[in-house]
Image (cartoon, rainbow, N blue to C red):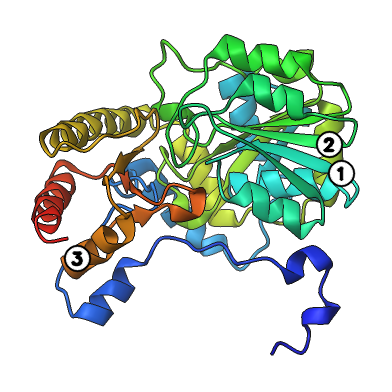
Amino acid sequence: MNQFLQLALEGVQQLMPYVPGKPAEELQRELGLSEVIKLASNENPLGTGRKVAEAIQNTLPEIARYPDGSGYNLKTAISARWGVDLAQITLGNGSSEILELVMRTFVAPEHEVVFAQHAFALYPILTQAVGAKAVVVPAKNYSHDLDAMRAAVTDKTRVVFIANPNNPTGTLLASQAVEDFIASLPKSVLCVLDEAYYEFVDPAVRTESMQWPIQYPNLVIARTFSKAYGLAGLRIGFGVSSPEVADLLNRVRQPFNGNMLALAAAEAAMTDAEYLAETVSVNNAGMAQLTAAFTALDLPWIPSSGNFVSVDMKQPALPVYQALLQKGVIVRPVANYEMPNHLRVSIGTERENQIFIDALAQVLQSV
C-alpha cells in the first residue's frame, strides 16, 4: 500500500503511468540476443543526421552553462521556416510538454476535455491528472468523427485535442474539414492540433496550418523534432499559437526546459533538408514494403500517413507480440487504445522491415 496515495490529487490517484515501448537493451538482456530490431516507438531509423551530430559536438564544451532560457536561436529558426512571429512560439520538452502546458494553463477540475477514441494515450492521462472530465468520442473508421466531436462540445468544454495524423491509427483528416471544425468552436474552447507526424504526410494533402492561429486565436499547434528530425532522445518540440495564448503558456513553462544540446540540435536539424528528404523517402519505401507483406499474409491494415502502420492480426495481438519478442523483434501492442487485435509497427530500414516480416510470417504459423 502506498502510504502517500491519499495525499495525491484525486485524478492522480487513479492514474496508470504511460508505458513506453520496450527498450531493445532490456530485451537483449532478458533473452541473451545478439541483435534486437525495435519497431515500437515511431523513431527515425536513420539515426542522427550529420549536421545534428556536428552541432552537438560543437556545443559540448558549453554544457556546464545553463542554456538560453528563451531558446532565441531556435525560435528564430522556427519563425523563419514557418513564417510565424517569435511571440507565437512556445518551446517544449518534446511536443508532449506543449500539450501539458495547455492543460496546466487552462483546464480545471470543473472542465471537460474532448478527444477521439483511439487517439494518443497522453490526452486522457493529462486530463485525469488535472482532475477534469474526459469526453471520449467514438471513432469513425479508426479516425476522428469531427461532427460527433463538435456535438460533444458543451459550455464545460475547455480543450479539444485533434491528432493529425493520429497515433496509433495513422489516419489523416482533410485540411478543410479540420479548419471548418476549428472555426466552429466557441472562442472559449481551445483546440490543440497535434501534428507530431506532419513531415510524413504527402504534401499534396497535408494541412498547412501554421498561419491559422492568427485567424483562430484559440488554436494551439504542437510539433516535434522527435520523429522526422531524429531527435527523440533529446526531447525538443514547439507550439505555435496566438501571441496571447503563447504568453500564458510561457508563464507556466519551466525555465530551461529545452536543454542546450537539444536546442542546438533542433536548430541544425531544420537546415538539413537532405536528411529530411531521405527520412521521408525511406519511410515511403518502408510503408510500401510492410503493407505489401500484410497483403501477402492476408492481414488488414489501417492506411497510415505517419511513420508507422497498425495491422490487424485477426486474433488477439498480445500473443503475436510476445512471440515476436522471442525472435528479437519489438513492435507495439495497442490494446490500451481499444484495438486488442492490432499491432502498431514503426517503419524501419529495409533490412529491419524484412526481419520483422519474416518473423511475423513464422509467428503466424504457430499462434
Category of crowding for the residue at label 2, using alpha-carbon neighbours closer than 10 angstroms: few (below 14), some (14–19), many (at least 20): many
Q: Which residue is mark 3?
A: 328
Q: Are marks 1 and 2 in contact (CB under 8 Å)?
A: yes
Which residue is more in the foreground, 159 or 261? Answer: 159
Q: For the residue labelled by badge 2, is the local secondary structure a helix, a strand or a loop?
A: strand
From the viewer's perspective, tell me whether residue 258 is left or right of residue 196: right
Q: Which residue is mark 1?
A: 111
Q: Amino acid at mark 1?
A: His
Residue extending farthest to the front is 315
User: Which residue corresponds to the image point at 64% horizontal and 53% vertical from the top-left?
Assistant: 258
Residue 242 versus residue 363 in the image, above or below: above
User: Which residue corresponds to the image point at 83% horizontal and 35% vertical from the top-left?
Assistant: 157
Q: Distance from label 1 to label 2 (Cα)?
A: 6 Å
Mark 3 and mark 2 lie on one chain; the one further toward the N terminus is 2
User: Which residue corresponds to the image point at 15% horizontal and 52% vertical from the top-left?
Assistant: 360
Say which quadrant the C terminus sits in. bottom left
From the viewer's perspective, tell me whether residue 27 is left or right of residue 211: left
Say which quadrant the N terminus sits in. bottom right
Give percent across and percent down for residue 12: 75, 67
Category of crowding for the residue at label 3, using alpha-carbon neighbours closer than 10 angstroms: few (below 14), some (14–19), many (at least 20): many
**What mark, if any, has residue 158 been given in the picture?**
2
